[in-house]
């Protein structure tokens, strides 16, 4: 070890050691001459001084490190001599490395979901669902939970939870709305989560007479209470219920998804009747048990329950899904992975460009390399020196790529809303991202440098020395390799162009989809009426009536109303029967989306009925037996008939509901943000007919909507000081947010495709330009014997467009298969859309023609006399 350290130090003391060695050799020569009395014989007996010096130097230093350092210095001088090549290569690589690092950081952060749960991949969701609608994440009833917990064996312990909004007020700050999870007391134990402060839930906390308690997330403790260590034992009002803080969880615990508070799911909650399906049931697979085995057991349990209790379990199937399949952004992981692959194509194309540039330089460097081989340099040394040059180029590109990545991550951070993105996503270049950047920089250096290095190391020494290097490294093999690289780049570019074309068309379809309302100058906000204070439907209706009076009187407010949801977001689900239709069981009744709205909802949205009328204040306050439907509903359920006066009845519970008369037909309003081009049948109920605790306030204003947010908040809290107002935003902002997925992926794929197209075109240009320079003599001969400008242009274009044609032949089938991954993100366009593929072909042919045009122009300007004398 000490000897190695001394050898490494010798690299930095070389001049001094050389001087000492010369002195020592002179001393030995003098001593030998004195001993023999003959200086010439003394020198002869001592041996070759140069060979002696080399032998001693090998003992001083680690030869490998010394020669590598020499190669690094030589590479720096070589790159400095060709600033144009160096700048182009570094720019192409930096762009590819930077965008790759940006996308990797974003995607890996998005998919690094654990919520602090150990081995989350073994966590599963369990439940009963309609066989025709089998999907992960369905809600279950308390009866389902009780039965499954008693019978399942492949999952040792089952827990249940439900997500509910919570209003928190305690006098320390303004009331706030948080995301609360009611969870069975064993739930956090199953996840392996333990409090940072205080204790977790115990069996005593779920008893009916237990003191209400709450667990806080770290961020609530930090943001609202300033990490107050005396928080334990403090009373908080949560939905008007005083609850004692018993613990604070560690910073990374947010299970099941962006949770703020946990409260226990009590035995009273779990004793609810079977028809209410509001619980998510989860557990951890027993070690050694596979998912398929758990599913088989659940199927057996489902059949057993259907036979035992057909009233509650007939027509249902049991299933087991990985927990992550039902959580937020994980549903889009295929699309995210496709984005990583797409941006990887950009880097591959950049590497292909630089490899072609290096191959083009190989012809000029063939003479240099052949001379080095002729005087004793081994091929391994030649390859190593050229690879060091490539790695040095990639390292410099990696440095600039780091700057590109930082810029890209800042753009992502600025273009996404903090309030809507998951809390675990971090748009910063962390250690993992930096290591990824370093890895792809080194990998790219080896990838684009290996082929040219091997090509040059096999140069024919005799031909290289005789003809000055022309054709030695750029012969048939070199040209074929360059052409192959261009074809690969073109094929990858086609995939990116096709993906970008599909995403652009989806974005256009999304933005052109009619919403059905006038979204400008509409202010929206959310409120959640707690059950303790507003126990009866009449209390909820009274609150909104009083609030409407206050808000309508504010200056700048033209109209105000309420709605259970907003356009482009979501809708309630209603099962119903139509008067006069054939009787059917409840599970086979038709269903439809719907909204509960206030009297002025359609006035706020500036929607006018096509037939009949909309709700009046009397309808909204008394809950009249009336209903409004949209055109899609009328066309589906009363085709060719007059819908006005028709009656329908909602199916709720076991009690018969009143018949509702259709009083109006309104235009179709977009309610499903996932399928904006589809017009869903919708039912609109007056608020008093079906009061909801969580409602949106909507108001059309004569002034900028954002200026009234604080005034609305004051009016709400003048009626209830503990009631928070949250998500105060304009309707335009919400609609833009609903389009963000399509827009963001469309922008990303467009950027990737544009960069790839430029890089592929530059690569084609480099190959054709190099071919023209190597064929200067041939072109001169052709022109000297009568060749026309058109002949020369055809020769150049034939070579370039042949590679474009092969790239199309390879890339189009590849794109045809790969773009199917984008199906989930496409709106109104097929993954095999012919117009998109035709457009891609035309764009690539145009780019290829442009890449050939400049070399062709240069070729026709060749002077035959100069060309024949050039060598």
Image (spheres, rainbow, N blue to C red):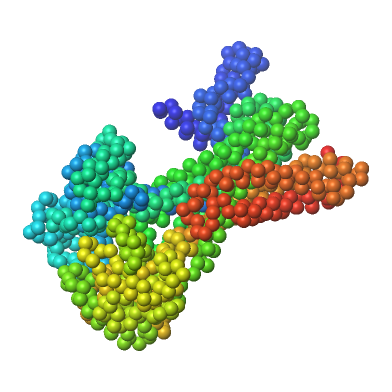
The vertical placement of 33 against 809, above or below, is above
Is 856 positioned to the left or the right of 273 in the image? right
Q: Quadrant of the C terminus?
A: top right
The one nearer the camera, 142 or 192, is 142
Residue visible at 54% across and 57% down in the picture? 829
Q: Quadrant of the N terminus?
A: top left
Q: Quadrant of residue 695?
A: bottom left
The one nearer the camera, 177 or 435, is 177
Q: Position of residue 633 (x, y in %)?
A: 41, 68
Q: Position of residue 809 (x, y in %)?
A: 65, 43
Is 76 positioned to the left or the right of 102 in the image? right
Q: Position of residue 180 (x, y in %)?
A: 24, 60
- The answer to whether residue 85 is seen in the rendering is no
Residue visible at 35% across and 64% down in the picture? 581
Residue visible at 69% across and 45% down in the picture? 805
The one nearer the camera, 102 or 737, is 737
The one nearer the camera, 754 or 802, is 802
- The answer to whether residue 843 is seen in the rendering is yes
The vertical placement of 767 against 682, above or below, is above
Q: Quadrant of residue 358?
A: top right
Q: Position of residue 601 (x, y in %)?
A: 36, 77
């Amino acid at each position: 070890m000490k000897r190695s350290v001394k050898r490494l130090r010798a690299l930095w003391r070389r001049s001094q050691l050389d001087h000492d060695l010369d002195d020592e050799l002179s001393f030995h020569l003098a001593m030998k001459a004195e001993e023999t009395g003959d200086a010439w014989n003394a020198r002869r007996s001592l041996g070759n001084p140069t060979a002696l010096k080399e032998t001693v130097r090998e003992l001083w230093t680690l030869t490998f490190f010394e020669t590598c350092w020499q190669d690094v210095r030589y590479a720096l001088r070589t790159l400095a001599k060709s600033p144009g090549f160096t700048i182009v290569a570094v720019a192409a690589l930096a762009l590819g490395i930077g965008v790759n690092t940006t996308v990797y950081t974003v995607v890996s952060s998005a998919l690094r979901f654990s919520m602090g749960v150990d081995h989350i991949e073994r966590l599963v969701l369990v439940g009963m669902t309609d066989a025709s609608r089998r999907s992960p994440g369905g809600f279950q009833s308390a009866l389902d939970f009780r039965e499954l917990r008693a019978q399942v064996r492949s999952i040792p312990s089952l827990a249940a939870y439900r997500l509910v909004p919570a209003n928190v007020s305690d006098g320390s700050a303004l009331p706030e709305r948080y995301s609360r999870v009611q969870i069975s007391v064993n739930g956090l134990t199953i996840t392996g989560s333990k409090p940072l402060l205080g204790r977790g839930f115990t069996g005593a906390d779920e008893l009916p007479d237990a003191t209400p308690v709450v667990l806080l997330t770290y961020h609530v403790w930090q943001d609202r209470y300033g990490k107050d260590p005396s928080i334990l034992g403090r009373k908080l009002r949560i939905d008007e219920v005083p609850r004692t803080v018993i613990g604070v969880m560690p910073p990374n615990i947010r299970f099941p998804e962006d949770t703020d508070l946990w409260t226990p799911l009590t035995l009273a909650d779990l004793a609810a009747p079977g028809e209410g399906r509001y619980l998510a049931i989860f557990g951890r697979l027993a070690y050694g048990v596979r998912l398929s085995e758990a599913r088989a057991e659940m199927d057996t349990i489902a059949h057993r329950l259907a036979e035992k209790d057909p009233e509650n379990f007939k027509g249902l199937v049991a299933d087991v899904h990985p927990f992550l399949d039902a959580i937020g952004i994980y549903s889009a992981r295929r699309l995210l992975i496709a984005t990583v692959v797409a941006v990887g194509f950009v880097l591959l194309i950049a590497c292909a460009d630089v490899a072609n540039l290096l191959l083009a330089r190989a012809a000029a460097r063939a003479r240099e390399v052949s001379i080095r081989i002729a005087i004793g340099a081994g091929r391994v040394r030649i390859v190593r020196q050229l690879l060091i040059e490539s790695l040095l180029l990639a390292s410099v590109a990696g440095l600039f790529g780091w700057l590109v990545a930082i810029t890209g991550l800042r753009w992502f951070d600025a273009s996404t809303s903090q309030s809507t993105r998951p809390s675990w996503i971090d748009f910063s270049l962390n250690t993992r991202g930096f290591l990824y950047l370093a890895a792809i920089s080194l990998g790219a250096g080896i990838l684009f440098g290996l082929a040219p290095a091997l090509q040059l190391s096999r140069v024919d020494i005799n031909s290289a020395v005789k003809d000055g290097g022309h054709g030695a490294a750029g012969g048939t093999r070199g040209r074929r390799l360059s052409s192959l690289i261009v074809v690969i780049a073109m094929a990858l570019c086609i995939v990116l162009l096709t993906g970008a074309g599909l995403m652009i068309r989806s974005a256009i379809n999304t933005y052109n989809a009619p919403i059905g309302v006038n979204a400008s100058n509409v202010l929206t906000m959310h409120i959640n009426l707690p059950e303790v204070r507003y126990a009866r439907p009449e209390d909820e209706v009274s609150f909104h009536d009083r609030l409407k009076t206050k808000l309508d009187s504010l200056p700048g407010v033209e109209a105000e109303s309420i709605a259970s949801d907003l356009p482009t977001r979501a809708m309630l689900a209603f099962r119903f029967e139509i008067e006069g239709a054939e009787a059917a069981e409840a599970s086979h009744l038709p269903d439809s989306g719907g909204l509960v709205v206030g009297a002025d909802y359609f006035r706020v949205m500036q929607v006018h009925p096509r037939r009949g009328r909309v709700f009046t204040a009397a309808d909204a306050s008394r809950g009249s037996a009336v209903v409004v439907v949209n055109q899609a509903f009328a066309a589906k359920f009363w085709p060719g008939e007059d819908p006005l006066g028709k009656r329908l009845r909602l199916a709720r519970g076991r009690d018969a509901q009143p018949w509702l008369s259709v009083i109006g037909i309104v235009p179709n309003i977009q309610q499903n943000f996932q399928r904006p081009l589809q017009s869903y049948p919708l039912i609109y109920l007056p608020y008093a007919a079906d009061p909801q605790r969580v409602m949106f306030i909507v108001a059309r204003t004569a002034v900028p909507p954002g200026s009234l947010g604080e005034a609305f908040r004051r009016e709400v809290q003048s009626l209830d000081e503990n009631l928070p107002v949250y998500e105060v935003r304009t309707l335009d902002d919400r609609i833009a947010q609903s389009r963000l997925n399509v827009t963001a992926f469309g922008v990303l794929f467009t950027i990737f495709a544009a960069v790839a197209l430029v890089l592929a075109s530059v690569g084609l240009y480099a190959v054709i330009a190099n071919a023209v320079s190597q064929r200067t003599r041939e072109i001169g001969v052709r022109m000297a014997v009568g060749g026309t400008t058109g002949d020369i242009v055809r020769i150049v274009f034939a070579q370039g467009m042949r590679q474009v044609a092969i790239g199309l032949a390879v890339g189009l089938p590849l794109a045809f298969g790969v773009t199917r991954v984008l199906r989930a993100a496409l709106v109104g366009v097929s993954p095999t859309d012919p117009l998109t593929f035709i457009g891609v072909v035309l764009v690539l042919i145009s780019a290829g023609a442009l890449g050939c045009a400049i070399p062709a122009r240069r070729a026709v300007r060749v002077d035959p006399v100069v060309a024949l004398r050039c060598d």
